[in-house]
Amino acid sequence: MNYIGVDLAWGEGTATKAAKETGLVRIDSSGTVLDAGWARGIDAVVEWLVSNSAAGDVIAIDAPLVVANATGMRECEREVAQRYGQWQVYANPSNLGRPWFGGVTLRQRLEQVGFVYTDGRTPPRPDTVQFFECYPYTTLVGAPELGYEVERPRYKRFNPALPSPAARRHFRASECDELLRRMLRLTDVSPALDLRSHPVTAALIDDESPLNDAAYKHREDLLDAALCAWTAALWAHFGLERCQILGELDAPDTEGRIPVIIAPARPEQRLGGKVARPKRKNVGAMRLVEPQLAQVDGATTATALLTVAASVLALDHVEDPDSKAFESALAAVLATIAGLKAC
């Protein structure tokens, strides 16, 4: 049995704009990296996965795979905030109004070639290739092996508290290098991940993180794919002993698929675990929604506040700095509030 991680570029590209890179990593049951690299576009990703997988393998994909809700966010994304918010981990909202569906397209294409989507409620099957949705941030804070006891590493977005773009880039690079040093610990655990066992992933360890944005994103995509592969191995080895299913009670789509995220979890991150509420507040984002909140009719104040708070937390952690992505996320927040008005 092998384990594959896919850090999918959510946008599928157009006739005039190429798709962004997708990171891909495949490891075996000993943690040895068998293949690693990048692909552009859904066709290339599917071709790579079909060529590098066999019955019994498990694939973990960082992208929304099942999206049936018209507005707002999926239940699994709400539960990310509920279970992991203390560690500053939140999920971007996904709904049918968003402009990118790369994950859904990939799921459809994989099902066409015989791969099977799993919601994690049953063990891996030896007779087929299964795949599921994951979220690397939950792996980082949900796996004690990596040592992120307080909060997630800030290796994706710039830290706005720093005084200059140069300082933010240096800090981001240092956070990434520290994360990779911690990932070396996975060489000697079960399941294992040995980044030094393949020249492409070994370069993550041997080379310092670049400051240039494009070069950094290239590196980050591979890192996240490695985390996804290890998440696939963790679920395959230990199931719900080490992982939890976020969104398990959400409504299925028309073909019975439940939109879930399979996430490594500490005991205190599980349903009923004693987790303090996140202390971080996004005052600027809250100002954007206060006028809308004031108009909510027919819903209790508590329900309205909880819904808006979850939306604001997700908005604050939009990972793509592109202003269009922010605008789309804001639109999802306002759509959620509009839904409250109709209650």
Image: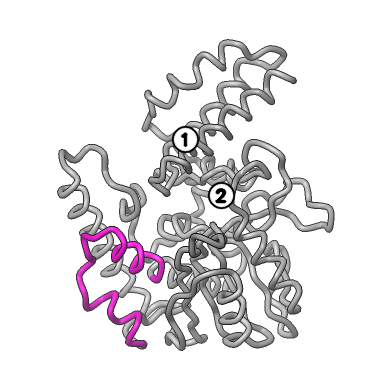
Is 110 on the left-hand or right-hand side of 161? right
Q: Amino acid at mark 1?
A: Leu
Disc 1 target residue: 313
Q: For the point 45% across and 34% down, which residue is it? A: 277
Disc 2 target residue: 270
Number of the label disc, if any, that sits on residue 135: none
Q: Amino acid at mark 2?
A: Arg
* Tag 2 secondary structure: loop
Q: Which residues are magenta?
A: 198-222
Q: For the point 38% across and 24% down, which residue is it? A: 284
Check if residue 339 falls in the magenta segment.
no
Residue 127 versus residue 90 in the image, above or below:
below
Q: For the point 61% across and 68% down, which residue is it? A: 239
Check if residue 200 falls in the magenta segment.
yes
- Picture coordinates of residue 133, whole percent (x, y): 60, 61
Residue 52 versus residue 301 in the image, above or below:
below
Is 290 on the left-hand or right-hand side of 297? left
**Which of these two is toward me, 311 or 321?**
321
